[in-house]
Image: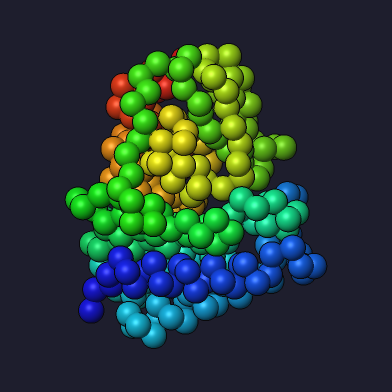
Amino acid sequence: MLPTLLEIEELARRAGEILRAGYEQKHQLEYKGVIDLVTEVDHQSEAFLLAEIQRRFPGSSILAEESGSLDGDKDHLWYVDPLDGTVNYAHGIPIFCVSIGYARRGVTTLGVVYDPLRDEVFSAERGRGAWLNGRRLHVSQAEELDHSLLVTGFPYDAWHSPRDNMEYYARFARLSQGVRRLGSAALDLCYLAAGRFDGYWELTLKPWDVAAAGLIAEEAGALVTDIDGKADYISAPQSILAAPAALHQKMLAVLQK
């Protein structure tokens, strides 16, 4: 049995209720790295999603942020980020979401990102378009960097990694209207899809960060690649560049300098 977009939207909304209930409460923090943390709400949201996916679509493979890879039928693979923007969430900053992607035979076909505080459901089905609460999404028509508002993120190992993104951030900040950092890769891509941002890049990610939102951006008209311009932005070593086609070419040129 194949999932439908409406079913995934329902799952995302119900997981979002868990996030909303725990928001601005005192949290139990665990550290996966120096600045990479997880809360008990991450675990609660993921436990709910994994149980529901396994109950409704038994035998599926699942790749989830906290549980890792759960083996199953590789033709049916779910990407689950139960709380994208955990650092924001832990500090009471209202920028976070649930992200769920579904891939059939290696191709992501359904994606949903839900922001529970704004009650915004971003969704897409491959070949059929992208929507925000039922309204069709389209990327901006930006073609020039100096007329563009960009967004990016930084890796959790930025203290030690040579791929810390600081150099690219400085370059784009000098060439554009500005560069924002929201702290949620999934929302960065969804805001791009909605035309709120014109371009997005990031150097170090995980599949669950971008599987659903990358599809949403693509279906809204963005060209989405890795930072070398290759089509695969899911496989390791991961990076991503997303923008309207004309702007994508200009951003790619900056990244390749």
Q: Quadrant of residue 157?
A: top right
Q: Check the image and report above or below for 14 versus 162.
A: below
Residue 98 in view, yes or no: yes
Q: Check the image and report above or below for 67 versus 122.
A: below
Q: Check the image and report above or below for 173 versus 204.
A: above
Determine whether, in the image, residue 180 is placed left or right of residue 99. right
Task: Name the outermost residue toward the right.
Answer: 26
Residue 236 x/y as whole percent: 43, 46
Q: Check the image and report above or below for 64 versus 1.
A: above
At x 37%, y 23%, the residue is 142
Please state, as top left, top right, bottom left or bottom right, where the N terminus lies in the image.
bottom left
Residue 127 x/y as whole percent: 19, 50
> Which residue is nearer to you in this view: 40 or 76?
40
Residue 215 in view, yes or no: no
Q: Quadrant of residue 90?
A: bottom right
Residue 124 x/y as whole percent: 31, 54
Residue 129 x/y as whole percent: 25, 49
At x 43%, y 80%, the residue is 52
